[in-house]
Amino acid sequence: MEAVLHFFSSISWWMWILFIILLIAIRDILFNKSHTISHNFPVVGHIRYMLESIGPEMRQYFVANNREELPFNRIERGWVYASSKNENNYEGFGTDRDIYQHQHIFIKNCMIPFKMDAAHPNNKDKTFLPCAKVMGLYNERRKPYRPASAINVSAMSFGSLSARAIESLNIGVKQANAYHNTGEGGLSPYHSHGGDVVFHFGTGYFGVRTKDGNFSMSKLKTLIEENPFIRAIEIKLSQGAKPGKGGVLPGAKITPQIAKIRGVEVGKDVLSPSSHTAFSDVPELLKFIEDIANETGLPVGIKAAIGKIEQWELLAQLMVETNRGPDFITIDGGEGGTGAAPPSFADHVSLPWIYGFSTIYKIFQKHNLTQRVVFIGSGKLGFPAKGAMAFAMGADCINVAREAMLSIGCIQAQVCHTNKCPSGIATQNNWLQKGINVPLKSDRLAQYFKTFRKELTEITHAAGYEHPCQFTMKDVNVNVDDVDLTRTLEDSYKYSKTPVDFTSIQHLKDCTYLGGHYHKNETH
């Protein structure tokens, strides 16, 4: 034995390296049947795969310019990071953006901006910016709800995101007086840290399903009764990343905790159908909405990515005829999506937000329904200028997903679908998510929301208004082409937004249906 050890110890380190290279070469030539490059070019062919594997990181940090990357470029990510940390998010020496680029946004400022009086709520809290409409008020729901924040967390479920990420988001929305959409994965303990919650479910009915996968009204009622912080219910018809396509949750990812929350079996693949079983057409959808609202007392809305419009026309007609319908509608853009999706869906199915929203808003405006519905925009709108544009087009609130992820540490690695998210946000790997400092990350989410609302309010005042709901489509121009240089939103999308009933910010603050913790804070 000593002779063997002596022999191995006498071999030089460079000989070991040559030996390992020889083994790799033998393996590549004789046994490799799947990779042509490494077979034809043994050893050195592996360098190609190594460089390819780090290509996205190399381009992100060393090759792409500040405005080049997608879905969010370096300037956009930097603004979210700085805003969430309450750092300097200004830029010097003028913009480095090509302001003549197609679809560039121009917000028209006034010669004399809006001036707040001494008692104005925004003098005390520059970040106070609630929704100008109340969910469920028109339909006389028992528990109407006015979102206390113009920007909120969009649908992202526990399972897709890690426990610590969900917990950070929920504590953050509590601090920011916003709401937290659960996503279709069900209500988890990590959604239950005091923030307002919108309970969201899709075709899998996770958390409110029977054993055979159908919807259970009794489970939904129990869930609402046991969790009074749930302020509204959202039914997902489709989403931006993969509208009209179901999903598969692999059994390997279903832990006992996820199985309990979703109402599924441990270790068994779960299929989310491409369509609902609780209803099959628009009249049945309308009845389903009303049944849930009557049983729970909460406002009920729908979420969808937009394609064909015939069924939306029918929905609007039925709402006029029956004097009932969804209390809010969330329009998701085809450019959105935190979940994994085939490129054919993510790239080509459903309209981008700006086209989808304008199409649906015009249908509801034609039927005089816009005042009855709270419109929520979702699709890369988590920046003040884009927020102003969305409000000018008729949005009443904005939901953000990926921007919220950026605020708690996402680095846009784009490996959400692999369970290897390096920042611990979109993974169930315990080691990776341990890197999330929940108190710190929740503070950053809250600060991002507050900075967003503050800057959106400042843009609004610069345009001469008190609240962004007062923006009109004539207040925003976009670059179109070389002939018409710029056009107003009104000229571009061929409609004028219906004016929103608005008295004052103080009136919104005094509203008994205001969400968040504003009134609770005042009583204490």
Image (cartoon, helix red, strand yellow):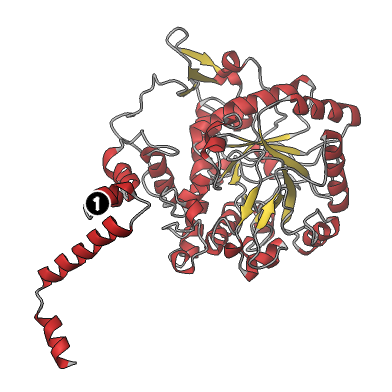
Question: What amino acid is at disc 1?
Answer: Ile
Residue beneath disc 1: 47
Residue at 73% x, 29% y is: 501
Quarter holding residue 99:
top left
Residue at 74% x, 53% y is: 205
In the rendered view, would you say 281 is above or below 298? above
Left or right of residue 241, residue 303 in this image: right
Residue at 74% x, 42% y is: 275
| Outermost bottom residue | 2
Quarter holding the N terminus?
bottom left
| Outermost right residue | 322
Percent coordinates x, y for residue 174 in the rendering: 60, 56
Residue at 12% x, 83% y is: 7
| Outermost front residue | 30
Percent coordinates x, y for residue 60 in the rendering: 33, 43
- Mark 1 nearby-residue class (10 Å; few <14, some 14–19, many ≥20): few
Quarter holding the C terminus?
bottom right
Nearer to the camera, 486 or 259: 259
Asked whether residue 457 is in view, the answer is: no
Left or right of residue 54, residue 515 in this image: right
Percent coordinates x, y for residue 22 in the rendering: 19, 63
Quarter holding residue 26:
bottom left
| Outermost top residue | 483
